[in-house]
């Protein structure tokens, strides 16, 4: 898989461990000649990831909503821009342009993108995997909730066909580069 979508926080006030993980993934993307598909923002984990990927030689696709452009918050690490109207458009572009997606630590925007990718997979609109990169246990509570959905019988497609868990960088890379 060469085009890897990444959903993550745009907040600059995140833990250093999350920033380090974003840079590590970005470097790996570049060193392995992958394409990063992400939201184009010049802040937070998004910027850490994109700068590291760009500097290491990855192609960087930025899917950029109009508001981000109007406010001048587009990363200079973006090689190819996809312009869109809003977050719904961005989400659709991110999913369609990616062969696999990674959800790094993030807030409601990251979860919105991740759940949309999962819902579309479950509904049969695509069969692309989402990988929750569980840096420092970030997604432990979410995993417990998703497991409870399965245990209660409301999940209509096996989670193993929809998402994977990566608790370490090595686990993430094994999924991204089988």
Image (spheres, rainbow, N blue to C red):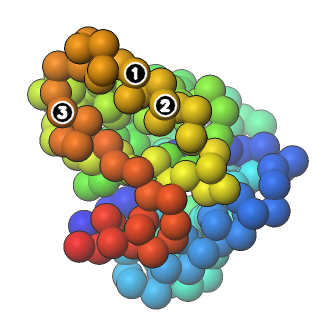
The mark nearer the N terminus, 2 or 3, is: 2
Quadrant of the drawing holding the C terminus: bottom left
Whole-percent x, y for residue 118 in the image: 32, 31
Cβ–Cβ below 8 Å for labels 1 and 2? yes
Residue at position x 49%, y 79% from top?
28
Q: Is residue 150 rendered to the left or right of residue 51? A: left
Foreground tag (3 vs 1): 1
Which residue extends farthest front? Answer: 151
**Local crowd size for mark 2, using a 10 Å CA cut-off: few (<14), some (14–19), many (≥20):** few
Residue depicted at x 51% and y 70%? 169
User: Would you place residue 30 above or below residue 109 in this image?
Assistant: below
**Mark 3 vs mark 1: which is more N-terminal?**
1
The label number, if any, that marks residue 148 in the structure image: 1
Front residue of 107 and 98? 107
Query: Element at badge 1?
Result: helix
For label 2, the residue is 144
Mark 3–mark 1 Cα distance, whole angstroms, equals 13 Å
Marks 3 and 1 close (CB-CB < 8 Å): no
Name above or below for residue 25 compared with residue 156.
below
Q: Position of residue 7 (x, y in %)?
A: 52, 46
């Amino acid at each position: 898989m060469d085009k890897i979508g990444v959903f993550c926080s745009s907040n600059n006030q995140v833990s250093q461990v999350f920033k380090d993980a974003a840079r590590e993934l970005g470097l790996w993307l570049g060193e392995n000649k992958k394409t990063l598909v992400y939201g184009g923002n010049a802040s937070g984990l998004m910027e850490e990831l994109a700068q590291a990927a760009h500097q290491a030689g990855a192609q960087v696709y930025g899917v950029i909503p109009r508001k981000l452009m109007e406010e001048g918050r587009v990363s200079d690490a973006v090689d190819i821009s996809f312009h869109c109207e809003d977050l719904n458009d961005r989400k659709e572009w991110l999913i369609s342009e990616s062969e696999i997606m990674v959800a790094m630590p993030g807030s409601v925007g990251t979860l919105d993108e991740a759940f949309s990718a999962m819902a579309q997979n479950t509904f049969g609109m695509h069969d692309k995997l989402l990988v929750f990169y569980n840096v420092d246990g970030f997604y432990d509570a979410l995993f417990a909730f998703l497991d409870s959905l399965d245990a209660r019988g409301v999940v209509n497609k096996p989670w193993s066909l929809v998402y994977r868990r990566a608790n370490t960088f090595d686990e993430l890379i094994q999924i991204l580069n089988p």
